[in-house]
Image (cartoon, grey):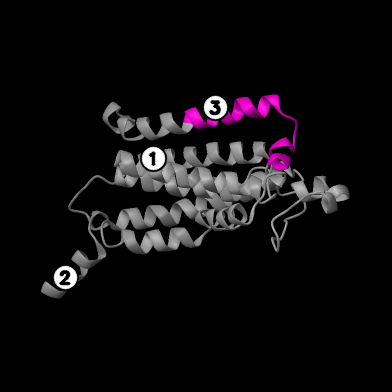
Amino acid sequence: MRVSRFKQYSFYVFLFLCIWVAGFVWWTFISKGDALMLFARNRSEFRNDFFVIATLFGEGYVYFIAALVALAYRIRHAIMFVVTGILVALVAGSLKWFFAQPRPATVFYKIMDDITVVPDMYLNVGDTSFPSGHTMSGFAFWSIAAFVVRNKMLQVLFLFIALLVGVSRIYLFQHFLDDVLAGSFIGVCIAVILHSFVEYKFQDESAWYNKSVWSRTKSKDIT
């Protein structure tokens, strides 16, 4: 990757690593499940509704919406969002199968009646906890979006949204802190690798993939 291209990621990645290292340090000083219990003791109706909404920003439909919007600017960006979603699904699914770590509700099933959870929230069970798929998806998607826009204010906003997705998975009692830390790191790695590859391989501004779908339609009508 050339220095000029690295600068596209440096600001965003630096902010992410600052937050990630702080989370990792916290993880080293607490016991497994402490972060879950911290949120369980501090629930409110507003926080419940807020994090239920926040977790949606890491789900598959955001890729579909982004791809449709991107078609109006550059076709390659639309394709990149779709490929990101596919990669996240494959990587998350493979790692969950390989590590086979139990979900919080599975680990704490004997005392679940004594733990305050979000009302009407379905708690996933089984051995699919590590890493957090929603978190990986959130950080991969919003990192790609940040690299595409290249505006520092929007990059901060997008990183904050991705962070909320990760925190929501702990708040909603779906994942442990280490699941979220791993998912966020892998998500950003996927975004950096994929975006740098696309930027390196598809630079021809006159090519169809660097046009909007509307400009291609107009050119076909003219011909």
Magenta highlight on residue 34: yes
Q: Is residue 223 visible?
A: no
Mark 2 vs mark 3: in front: 3
Name the image quarter holding residue 203: top left
* Secondary structure that dominates the magenta span: helix
Residue 71 screen position, x and y as percent: 30, 62
Residue carrying label 1: 156
The amino acid at mark 1 is Val
**Label 2 element class:** helix
**Label 1 element class:** helix
Name the image quarter holding residue 55: bottom right
Q: Quadrant of the C terminus?
A: bottom left
Disc on the earlier residue, 1 or 2: 1
Q: In front here: 141 or 46?
A: 46
Disc on the earlier residue, 2 or 3: 3
Residue carrying label 2: 218
Which mark is on residue 21? 3
Q: In front here: 38 or 58?
A: 38
Is 182 positioned to the left or the right of 188 in the image?
right
Asked whether the residues under the numbered discs 3 and 1 touch, taking CB atoms below 8 Å apart as contact, a structural biologist would say no
Magenta highlight on residue 72: no
Residue for point 45% across, 58% down: 63
Is 157 positioned to the left or the right of 112 in the image?
left
Is 118 positioned to the left or the right of 154 in the image?
right
How far is the residue under mark 1 from the one under mark 2?
A: 36 Å
Name the outermost residue toward the right: 110
How far is the residue under mark 2 from the one under mark 3?
A: 49 Å
Which mark is on residue 183? none
The amino acid at mark 3 is Val
The magenta stretch is 17-38
Residue for point 32% across, 58% down: 70
